[in-house]
Image (spheres, rainbow, N blue to C red):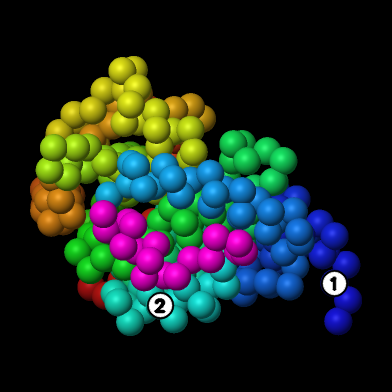
Amino acid sequence: MHHPEIGHGLTTTKAPFIENAQNEGKTFIHQPYELYNENNQEAWRKLYALLHPKWEKYANKKFMEGIQSLCLNPDRIPELEEINAFLEPLTGFKAKAVSGYVPTYLFFDSLQHREFPTTVTIRDSNNLHYLPEPDIFHDIAGHVPMHTDRTFADVLVKFGSLAHIAAKRHAHIANAEEKLAKIRSNIQALSRFFWFSIEFGLMREGERICVYGSGLLSSAGEIEHCIESPCVQRYPFQLEWVINQAFEIDHFQSLLFVIDSFAHLYEEVGQLEQWLHEGKLDHVNPGEPKVSDADLQAFLEVKYER
């Protein structure tokens, strides 16, 4: 079958297949593997070769075990079905192809159901360090190896359940302005927690500090910077700091938080859930990340059993 899109491949922001899916309102899609072109495969090869020695030096042990468990191929972009064949028997998680940005509620709710929304496009092989949005290397080589660990997988499931709790808590507030303000605050608190743990988290392993956050694990420059640079502040994970700390996505992070173990992170998610029930996430410090109207609307439209 002839595919007119194949010349364009599945390059981030330049893929007609993805554009069409988005125009049709499709969030969950299939991975059209035949559309990857040589530029796409070259991007994967270059990134893997660049990152692997840095993972060996800076990544946490569970991540390296996960890379082995998934049998990631350094030479070609993986098929999600292959990944899931290794992943599901370990923790019940599976990678699920998406057309791009997934609204916050849907993303968190997917985690609750042990599904990880996974981008299928890949950055341009001629500009590996520029990432306008998450790509398959960030998702599969950055996030998914961590999903092979049972405790970490349980962290994601428990965290994912908080979106539903947040939506349900405010459903009966009559004052629309008050309801929106509280939901916006809840979304910010949850997003900050996810950012400073799942995306940009550090972990203590014996005498050393290592990396478990996917944003760090998929960035050749930042994975080294976050451990070695004197410009980075590294503090023990403290929930009240994390939920009130704004972050920006377009530069190396200057403040990071360190957990002791994934069991420790699971406890922190439990604390986060308790604070959500108690209303302690209803008035967090404003600032980044901004919450879109679409994200707010998704929380308002949640159907739940009374």
**Residue 49 on the magenta segment:** no
Across and down, in percent, residue 175 comes to 31, 45
Residue of label 2: 86
The label shown at residue 3 is 1
Which residue: 61% across, 48% down? 46
Left or right for 205, reference 120: left
Q: Amino acid at mark 2?
A: Phe
Of callouts 2 and 1, the N-terminal one: 1
Q: Residue 138: in sight, yes or no? A: yes
Q: Is residue 46 left or right of residue 233?
A: right
Horizontal side of residue 76 vs 73, given as left or right: right
Instruction: Count residues near mark 1 (Cα–Cα under 10 Å), then give few for <14, some for 14-19, many for 20+.
Output: few
Secondary structure of the residue carrying tag 2 is helix
Name the quadrant of the C terminus. Answer: bottom left
Res 160 visible: no
Tell me, yes or no, whether the highlighted magenta stretch contains residue 74: yes
Query: What is the number of the mark on residue 129?
Result: none
Helix, strand or loop at disc 1? loop
Residue most extreme to the top: 231
Q: Out of 159 and 227, give the one closest to the viewer.
A: 227
Give 23 or 270, whichever is nearer the viewer: 270
What is the C-alpha distance between the residues marked 2 and 1?
A: 30 Å
Q: Is label 2 or label 1 in front? A: 2
Give x and y (percent) for residue 154. 22, 66
Judge from the rendering whether residue 177 lies leftward or rightward of residue 36; answer left or right. Answer: left
The residue type indicated by label 1 comes to His
Q: Find the magenta span and give its range.
A: 61-77
Using the rendered view, name the quadrant where residue 65 is placed.
bottom left
Which residue appears at 36% of the width and 48% of the height? Answer: 56
**Where residue 147 sits: x, y (%)?**
33, 64
Q: How many marks?
A: 2
